[in-house]
Image (spheres, rainbow, N blue to C red):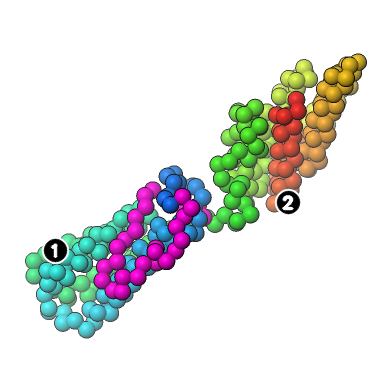
Amino acid sequence: MVAEIRERSIAPAFGGNGLSLSHALPSPSDGQFSLRRPFQIVSLLEMLHEYGYTFFLMTEKIVRFEERLKSIDADQVIEGEVKKRLTEAYTVFQKPCVRLGLNSTDDQLKRIIEEIKKEGVRYDTLKGLIPELRRRLYDDVKRVEFIHVPANRIDHYRDLPQFGTDVADKFPKAIEDIQESAKCFALGRYTASVFHLMRVMEFAVQQLGKKLSIVLVSEKNWHNILDEVDRAIKALPITTSYQKTKRNKFAESSAHLRMVKDAWRNDVMHPKATYTEEEAERIFRNVRDFMVHLATKL
């Protein structure tokens, strides 16, 4: 799941049976939340540890107290110890509300705390404030949305070298588009993924052209690119075994390039209107193979 995790905070249990959903769950492998920026992968387990128990407790306390208020004399003054416990509980509940941007709920919590602290406050005051707190919490939570990344696409979204460390080390200028292409693919934005791969291929073709001493900087037509590459490869000398090996490696590059062209489904390097998941995956795989070949064989 994609979410923002800033700090670990588990609310203590106030009254009740003291059961903690947090303690019932296994801890994340690293024992803490290391993701500090938004738009990062967060597991369901981490979400439950970070917010699950807090909101379970919060909802349970609100509903239970709302039911109790029905049987309490409205004119009865709230005693000091009860005021202290309520103030502590609602103050703790403010922290996750602030982190998740549940502003309306946070405002209502502040209002309740202010009223509870007043001298001689009666339960009648809370009879209107608590149900409104529950309604605001439900409304606010509905507005907080998360993107679910399928398990078989999580590695595409992670900040790992998507084409391997050899490509990342050899072609650092292409890293951003490679990584963004993988993230777009993980989120189902297949055409956007291919657009990033187009930029990767523009860079890759330039690098191949430099190695063959030909200019392919402005060329976009696949047929012209392949003709230029094949012509340059055929012109390479093959007198020695080293020269033959070198020419064979360039021939492999041409073969990889043709596979990219066939997957592209377009006469020019610009993407066509839209790409399906299968088409984008095929292009991603072939571009990766081509880049790995450039990084490791040439």
Q: Residue at x 14, y 69 (%)?
A: 81
Q: Is residue 264 above or below residue 64?
A: above
Q: Magenta-highlighted stretch: main secondary structure?
A: loop
Quarter-of-image position of residue 251:
top right
| Position of 102 relative to 167 (above/below) | below
Left or right position of 49 against 214 = left
Name the residue at the right extreme: 239
> Percent x, y for residue 112?
21, 65
Within-10-Å neighbours for mark 1: few <14, some 14–19, many 20+: some
Q: Earlier in the sequence, mark 2 or mark 1?
A: 1
The residue tagged with tag 1: helix, strand or loop? helix
Q: Nearer the viewer, residue 257 or 9?
A: 9
Write down the residue under mark 1: 117
Quadrant location, the C terminus = top right
Q: Is residue 267 visible?
A: no
Residue annotated with mark 2: 278
> Which residue reaches farthest bottom?
71
Q: Disc 2 residue type?
A: Glu
Query: Is residue 126 left or right of 42 when viewed as pictured?
Result: left
Residue at 49% across / 47% down in the picture? 39
Q: Which residues are magenta?
A: 1-30
What's the distance in space between the residues labelled 2 and 1, CA to CA?
62 Å
Q: Residue furthest left?
A: 119
